[in-house]
């Protein structure tokens, strides 16, 4: 995914990172889990996007 401009500071460089806190389906606390990936502005640090790395494991 590509962000063109930060909504806060108009900077145009972004990086991706994770906090290694894994997200699990509510009804399967011991099942598979997935990393969250943050996309943030390299100018001001504003997080412009948070996504789940493997959304398919949440499929019923
Ligand atoms: Zn910014």
Image (tube, grey):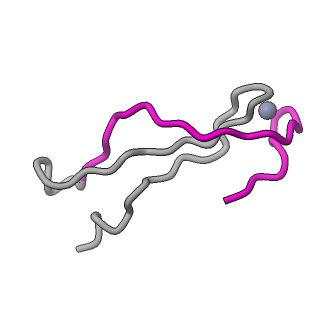
Q: Residue at x 67, y 43 (%)?
A: 48
Q: Residue at x 32, y 50 (%)?
A: 34
Q: Residue furthest right?
A: 10
**Residue 2 percent coordinates (x, y):** 73, 57
The stretch in magenta equals 1-24
Above or below: residue 43 compared with residue 36: above
Answer with the quarter of the image where residue 15 lies.
Answer: top right
Quadrant assignment for the N terminus: bottom right
**Residue 10 percent coordinates (x, y):** 89, 38
Ligand 1, by image quadrant, is top right
Q: Residue at x 38, y 63 (%)?
A: 55
Q: Residue furthest left?
A: 30
**Residue 44 percent coordinates (x, y):** 76, 25
Q: Residue at x 61, y 47 (%)?
A: 49
Q: What type of secondary structure mainly makes up the magenta span?
A: loop
Q: How many marks?
A: 0
Left or right: residue 38 versus residue 12 is left
């Amino acid at each position: 995914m590509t962000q063109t401009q930060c909504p806060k500071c108009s900077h145009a460089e972004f990086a991706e990172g994770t906090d290694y806190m894994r997200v699990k389906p509510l009804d399967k606390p011991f099942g598979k889990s997935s990393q969250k990936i943050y996309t943030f502005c390299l100018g001001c640090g504003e997080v412009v996007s948070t996504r789940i790395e493997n959304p398919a494991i949440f499929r019923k």
